[in-house]
Amino acid sequence: MATFLDELRWRGLIYDQTEGVDDLVARRKITLYNGFDPTADSLHIGNLVPMMQLARWQRFGHTPIALAGGGLILAAVILLTNSEMRRTPAPDRAVHGQ
């Protein structure tokens, strides 16, 4: 019997993955996210594939999160080390193209 991830592989939507993902997804539902460039003027056709991927995961009962704009910047800042944070502009000072 094919699994959800087998379906994604068949469609060519998985190139590489972390070891153990198949077992994890078989055991429980997961939360996953995709970030969209907050400096872009708008979303474009290149954003369609990850959005469709998030929708597929949701149809199979998982919890997708789409981050865009200031939410993506804030999530990135949380993950940075203190030295890297000093080089990251605050969301209210981020300027398109810089």
Image (cartoon, rainbow, N blue to C red):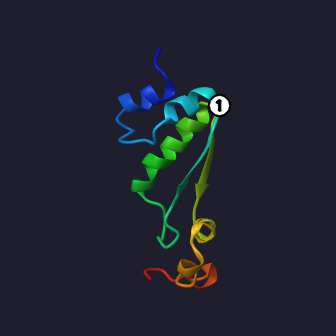
Q: Is residue 38 above or below residue 12?
A: below
In this view, the residue farthest toward the top is 1
Q: Residue at x 55, y 40 (%)?
A: 55
The residue carrying pointer 1 sits among few (fewer than 14), some (14 to 19) or many (20 or more) residues within 10 Å by Cα, namely few
Q: Residue at x 60, y 72 (%)?
A: 77
The three-letter code of the residue at mark 1 reads Arg
For the residue pair 41 and 4, the one nearer the viewer reads as 4
Q: How many marks?
A: 1
Q: Is residue 17 above or below residue 41?
A: above
**Circle 1 residue:** 28
Query: Going by the image, does 34 lie left or right of 74?
Result: left
For the residue pair 90 and 87, the one nearer the viewer reads as 87
Residue 7: where, in percent of width, then height?
43, 27
Quadrant placement of the C terminus? bottom left
Residue 58: where, in percent of width, then height?
60, 37
Residue 71: where, in percent of width, then height?
63, 66
Q: Residue at x 46, y 38 (%)?
A: 19
Residue 57: where, in percent of width, then height?
56, 37
Query: Going by the image, does 25 lie left or right of 97?
Result: right
For the residue pair 91 and 86, the one nearer the viewer reads as 86
Q: Residue at x 39, y 38 (%)?
A: 13
Q: Secondary structure at mark 1?
A: loop
